[in-house]
Image: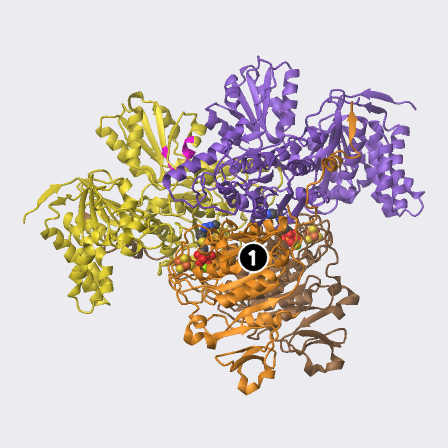
Chain colours: A brown, B orange, C purple, D yellow
Amino acid sequence: MSTSNGNGAAPHTNGGAPEELTKADFQSDQETRWCPGCGDYAVLSAVQQFMPELGIPPERIVFVTGIGCAGRFAYYMDTYGMHGIHGRAPAIATGLAATRNDLSIWVVTGDGDALSIGGNHLIHALRRNVPLKILLFNNQIYGLTKGQASPTSELGKVTKSTPFGVADHPFNPIGLALGAEATFVARTIDRDRHHLAEILRAAANHDGAALIEIYQNCPVFNDAAFSALTDKGLKDSNQIRLEAGRPIRFGADGERGIARTGDGSLEVVEVADVGEQALVVHDPRAADPGLAYSLAHLAEEPSGPTPIGIFREVHRPAFRRAEGSVDPPSEDQLGRLLFTEDAWTIA
Amino acid sequence: MSTSNGNGAAPHTNGGAPEELTKADFQSDQETRWCPGCGDYAVLSAVQQFMPELGIPPERIVFVTGIGCAGRFAYYMDTYGMHGIHGRAPAIATGLAATRNDLSIWVVTGDGDALSIGGNHLIHALRRNVPLKILLFNNQIYGLTKGQASPTSELGKVTKSTPFGVADHPFNPIGLALGAEATFVARTIDRDRHHLAEILRAAANHDGAALIEIYQNCPVFNDAAFSALTDKGLKDSNQIRLEAGRPIRFGADGERGIARTGDGSLEVVEVADVGEQALVVHDPRAADPGLAYSLAHLAEEPSGPTPIGIFREVHRPAFRRAEGSVDPPSEDQLGRLLFTEDAWTIA
Amino acid sequence: MTKTVEERERVVVRFAGDSGDGMQLAGTRFTDATAALGNDLATLPNFPAEIRAPAGTLAGVSAFQIHFASRDILTPGDAPNVLVAMNPAALRANLPELPKGAAIVANEDAFTKRNIEKAGYDSNPLEDGSLTAYRLHRIPMTTLTTRAVEGVEGASTRDAGRAKNLFALGLLSWMYGRPTDVTEQWIEQKFGSKPAVAQANVQAFKAGWSFGETTELLDVQYHVARATDVPPGTYRNVNGTKALSLGLVAASVRSGLPLLLASYPITPASELLHELSRHKGFAVSTIQAEDEIAAAGMALGAAFGGQIGVTATSGPGMDLKAETVGLAVALELPMVVVDVQRAGPSTGMPTKTEQSDLLMAIFGRHGESPVPVIAPSTPGGCFDAGFEAVRIAIRYRTPVILLSDTFLASSSEPWRIPEVGELAEIDPAFAAPERDNPLLPYARDERLARPWAIPGTPGLQHRIGGLEKEADTGNVSYDAANHARMTELRAAKVAGISREVPPLTVDGGPEAKLLVLGWGSSEGAIRAGVRRAREQGVEVACAHIRHLNPLPANTGDVLSFFDRVLVPEMNTGQLALLLRGRFLVDVESFCKVQGQPIFAAEVEREILARADGGKG
Amino acid sequence: MTKTVEERERVVVRFAGDSGDGMQLAGTRFTDATAALGNDLATLPNFPAEIRAPAGTLAGVSAFQIHFASRDILTPGDAPNVLVAMNPAALRANLPELPKGAAIVANEDAFTKRNIEKAGYDSNPLEDGSLTAYRLHRIPMTTLTTRAVEGVEGASTRDAGRAKNLFALGLLSWMYGRPTDVTEQWIEQKFGSKPAVAQANVQAFKAGWSFGETTELLDVQYHVARATDVPPGTYRNVNGTKALSLGLVAASVRSGLPLLLASYPITPASELLHELSRHKGFAVSTIQAEDEIAAAGMALGAAFGGQIGVTATSGPGMDLKAETVGLAVALELPMVVVDVQRAGPSTGMPTKTEQSDLLMAIFGRHGESPVPVIAPSTPGGCFDAGFEAVRIAIRYRTPVILLSDTFLASSSEPWRIPEVGELAEIDPAFAAPERDNPLLPYARDERLARPWAIPGTPGLQHRIGGLEKEADTGNVSYDAANHARMTELRAAKVAGISREVPPLTVDGGPEAKLLVLGWGSSEGAIRAGVRRAREQGVEVACAHIRHLNPLPANTGDVLSFFDRVLVPEMNTGQLALLLRGRFLVDVESFCKVQGQPIFAAEVEREILARADGGKG
Ligand SMILES: Cc1ncc(C[n+]2csc(CCOP(=O)(O)OP(=O)(O)O)c2C)c(N)n1
Ligand SMILES: Cc1ncc(C[n+]2csc(CCOP(=O)(O)OP(=O)(O)O)c2C)c(N)n1
Ligand code: SF4
Ligand code: SF4
Ligand SMILES: [Mg+2]
Ligand SMILES: [Mg+2]
């Protein structure tokens, strides 16, 4: 069954894809059931739009999702799909990847699904570098269950489960993924269809686990959580777009940038003051993951200048099925396995 | 019940501790049941030795442990103790800490217990900064179940469950803890009683979650895993002892050190070549966690120069019980809660 | 003009509209007014499964049903007498349950071509004659509301649009002579900050009322006398979630122990977490754990610390707590696990009710691990069940499973508030140091309960764990005879609780040959069904089990007393299997697995089918 | 000197010593020689619970028992006829199970003051007359071994000390006339790389043999004729773990599907993971998952991908897999879950056996989630059970639970190897695209199984999940009637498997009034107990259930055919409760919850107690 030995997700393994796939080929017949204005719509449309680029026929693409509003994603893609149980999608997808390396496997999960109940499976899938493209819809809230705090909800946020405000320090999904030895870690935004597609493209080309954090707006239970990065007036001054090999600059006219202080910590500077040569040059492939990690912690909350783009992208052998050939052996082989020399015959 | 409002673990909350506690006061009557030569013996003895320093009476100290050889630790301490279930000790201890802030709570766990099945509870306990002192006995193997691979087993290691060698990239426990927003992260070694005590001391004084990775030798299933850091001939050249505010030097005569390359990555240098001023000065309290993270990844395996000591030690409000007073209210209060204004009476 | 007033013993009204139409609000206001009037009542909200399905679609319909009467009420009612339909979808979604002859009050303004299509109608049901079997009242609520609000200073048209639910409420209040002051006061203080909005709402409400009073569209007004057979006492309206939370708080007060609820959100159990998180000033704290396993672990940790550890979840979460509950069984520590059952298997139908977790609660752990199981049967009963669960957990040092369900958690009824003094005392009976005899962590009292020696107590340091323990000392033991003995002791301890379990009481005359035996939320429907059958001259008895494990001591005798025993359950016959296995009685099942509560009419039907030896 | 040779029909030998003494090796060598000789046999190792308890202590004792005979053997035997005790602790730990008159072969060199104290003896049992009831043979094995090895070039004294287990083996081989060549060859190739060590061991072995041959200490030699009533065929010696792994591999070959075992280590189930990880060249792969939940998820993921997904664990791990098994029930995908039962509750006694997970396997998930349950009853039977579990899982698109236990997994017996051709064909019957009728993921075949449409198949893209699904289309549905129907279908599908379940076969004459009915690993003990009772003239029948859910179709009839039914179980009566509930038959239980297998003698006792109407 597992014929191709490449990573199903890599375009080059495109075997027998019909010439012309279009967005429509990836739209299922199910009526979408998200709230009006939900960021999930934008991501769905961007993903469906991007799929044809993979050059992989829909039948070799699988979406495994967890439970949550984000989890419904599977029903809307006209590919193979499994809407699993809460938090376990990475584990289920790992089993699939271990046995079918001819498939392109995508996981869609939420901040609660991936980081609360599913935290263990996520970090292990990343550590093993399982060839999965994991889309983490981070709306910093529990949507489907109607508004409880999530592990990414900011301190002090009042929710149904925290009437006196969130008291627990939130996870930084990028930081956690890096801590889990992830080989590809990126962040993008639901409303930025272009940037989203760019990141999907890079992830698809990555031979291994790719974690993409997508800031996703939940207008019903946590509206405008990311307005600092999406609103006309604010986005230019707050989006720090990471680009490999380029000094890290941002602001409407790139007037600000990131530099290192004497002790090696990162700080925001005015380019005019320090000059471009003083800026940190972004290198997602650096051996030392320290830079990516520092960048992840530049902004604890997406309320001010916040990096988006690819934080880290390094190569490491991807998870493959354990030893054992792919095709079931002949009956003779089985015979030899059963009838060992120490066997004896009674007439 | 929860009278003291400080962190039970902090010496200053020492209420009514008998003047003279000794190691013997912390030794239970149970016969220790580890294999001859197991590193657990050394850690047990070091911990029992250290306990009196806390100035907290044994009845206000609790050890919650998981399942594994390390998990047996609870039985040997003459404190309150619970030998829980596999991987769940941090969660159980969180419940205890949430309700009893007059106690000093210690968690003892193994690399499988904490990082495989218990990974999710560990990262959440660290994120919440629950006042627990977590001792992670890392022997890079499953001991109690007789020799399977653990999430810290090095690539290629042949174990009962990986006859063809471990294929999965291991976790870096320090890196994972940092990724989980831990406020106190340190590493020490079973055989270095002094260093161990030093770290225990610092952890006990930390008002919040403290993760201590202890390299622990398992002579039966993974002997000499840390010999590079413990053997006479090798330890001096391989132990990189991190000390706050000091340039990072190591080697028999401190002839080597850690410096930053142009791109900010860390590298090992000869002090003679670069001069001491070029060395990185260790700062576990830096706002930017990048340095700690880079140091954690300096050595992917403890086979060469490896940092030990405190990687990170920052302050963040510790987890406290959710809102709600401590002492049960009066019956009148209850009466008022039951009989609301919208109640009506039928004669 | 004068209007006739007709007497009614009981009425069931259902408000139905789009999620955005504020039906829940209209319903709860109507409920308060009804309670104030002294009618007995029971209510049941019905939310859409989607967070927010497209407006105007069937998936987006939200409804609230209230059953009120002049005599004691047992259920929120099966079929409505009046359906308020704010749009075509609401009409379509609820019509199937509407008996012929019932009244429909429709907001005709909402029956636009677009909405009619969205609801999946080809033609306008108000006009195509498809509703001739009902008493249809077409009322342009939107228009009338807008007109009524126009006058109000600074009220936007948006406010007007939003207020039509109060118009409907006003109209229904008139129809059933509900007091208006209660509602108007509520509006005033609710929108106190926005006087314009408050005004708009009051106007809409008044408009609805006077529309009924003045127009000729409606000619009859109904009167439902205040309930007389309700026992005296002070009452308030509570749903199962609220009552359960109060029961837990009460247990904390009566035991003098703080309570920790550690829970992971899940529909429908989340409500309990929301409810208890709000309690300040009481020694109640909550943690939203990272998952259900952690939640159970945290509750157990609190219990080890000498407090009341509670965790609450629904089906899928119960699966995950099994291992920790098993640990609690081995540790013999008090702990309460609440399972608000929902329709399974797997994710199933999260917003629908079911009773299919019973056998899991009793057997769903590896090894021999007996656990007491309690199931409340009415919203108010959740108070007692919560209190009782804590009491048993502490008295016997054992985890206790409390089985509620979606229906109980969300439906409400007037609940007689107990005086604090009426509540049992709960004695934690912590172990105290005794000179010259050291603590034996697994020694046992007359109830076979072991000492609860909590951290902080000098001299009682000890270690416990999940490995088999030697009797008395609690040391790890692999001894064969000891394991048999400990297995025996754990079972005997739980079985012994039956000494305190009230005997099963049978309601019915000595001639009854058929016993209808239920458990959990079906009690109201069963009693109502039995009552109806009796009104038709059928002799039938009924009883309800609140303690599923151990069962009341007289259960076997009760079963053997009758020729036939019928057990209605919202599952495929779980209690039935248990009773058959334990007592070898040929119990018959009525199984309903539709994600809906059992209805009185169904119980009635099943009884009649078995009356005079019917084969059922 | 000449020695008498006595005939024996059956002999039970137990090798016991310190974990470091190599008793498992001595035992397995003796086993191979015995097999080669054509005796029927059964063996059971017994490891200490501690990883490595202090040398010389009771906790450190390791034993290996072998039962061999000239006629078919049913169990590893209850009480040994000969106990080889390499040190005082070994003697003390095993003496309780030794019947008076049995032989003890003790290594007197090891009975030093220190060792005697370590074992908890006050005086030397070899000298204080406490063993007069036994036939005691004191042999200075250490000394004799050292002397025998001295001669060997380059063999250290350490080698000599290590070789005393081979001395014991040689001695016993002489006593029971086991062939020596088999063992010597084995030693040669085992230590081929270290000729000195090999030599040392051979010498020690020879020394043991000639010691028996020459000295006067031992005067009798026993002869056990080759078994004649063993059916013809080719045999090999396997334990349950080995047989199960072979059954799974065979199913993979016969279905043409690769197999993935995803598992998380746990005693005793880890062995299966170790076993299957070694298979190269076969389409069998393994993953050590991060936990049991992930392991189950991975197996399910493999199943979704069209392969055989298997996960294996023991008690605590089963609790954790419940939610995922429930998902598999909703998804209706094939999957095999192996539970190697151990003593519970909670962590319990990890190295001890028990049968207490039966009701959890059947009921341990929320909601109505029926799952087939199969339980092998002999080591060799694990092959068939593994194969059958995969076959049913694939044929019915359902998760299947296989209940083994510690005793089955570790005890071994000769197993007749099936010809590959004898094995059933397994047809995955993947769904294929059909032009003009699109896939209906929840359409059903005559067995009510749904299509298995795997990724990679053009045109069959579809989505499945844990929410309730509409019949046929598989779309999410909250419809009441549909939920009832789907619940019905899932139950009927599993119940329908009984059509393929072989009927329960009863062994016993028509006069028998008592039926002994068992399940799982107790079969050998039950048959042996029944045989012994019959030898005493008691009419008794027995039968064994291998399919626990659904039960064989004729179960009810069989039960009602007898006056009394006795069900021996290593739990508190789980199968008994099930049978009582399903068939209303007053089944009696013999419960043994000691972490030990049921013994033939116990079954015999229970039967005799009930013979001629004894009250039991
Ligand atoms: C075992 C289990 N626990 C809890 C739930 C209830 N539940 C469903 S989704 C969800 C969290 C949703 O939040 P998130 O993952 O952020 O997704 P979102 O809805 O925000 O997209 C929870 C708690 C469940 N379905 N299963
Ligand atoms: C739920 C569950 N799964 C598996 C086990 C079996 N088990 C016990 S300890 C252990 C891992 C031990 O390794 P580690 O945590 O590294 O501790 P160590 O023995 O090495 O000190 C496992 C898999 C268990 N007891 N419970
Ligand atoms: S609740 Fe929030 S996340 Fe969920 S569908 Fe609605 S808007 Fe989207
Ligand atoms: S197995 Fe290893 S870790 Fe466990 S007790 Fe023995 S030596 Fe220590
Ligand atoms: Mg979310
Ligand atoms: Mg370990």
Q: Quadrant of ligand 2?
A: bottom left
Total labels drawn: 1
Kindly tell me whether residue A64 is visible in this rendering: no
Is residue B292 shown to the viewer in this render? yes
Query: In this image, C69 relative to D209: left or right?
Result: right
**SS for callout 1:** helix
Q: Where does the C terminus of chain D fall, quadrant-wise?
A: top left
Give the quadrant of residue D615. Answer: top left
x, y percent for residue D456: 50, 57
Q: Nearer the viewer, residue D556 or B288?
A: B288
Q: How far across and down, in percent of the image, does residue C361 sit?
A: 53, 37
Q: Residue furthest front?
A: B19
Residue D198 among those drawn in magenta: no
Q: Looking at the image, which residue is at 13% across and 51% down?
A: D212
In the rendered image, residue C300, in percent from the top left (x then y), is placed at 56, 45
Question: Which span of residues is magenta-colored?
Answer: D568-576
Residue at the spot of label 1? B122
Using the image as rendered, state which of residue A1 and residue B56 is in the foreground. B56
Q: Is residue D300 above or below residue C537?
A: below
Residue type at numbered disc 1: Leu
Task: Return the residue found at the far top.
Answer: C511
> Quadrant of residue C472 in the image?
top left
Q: Would residue C248 appear left or right of C168 to someone viewing this image? A: left
The x, y position of residue D468, in whole percent, is 58, 42
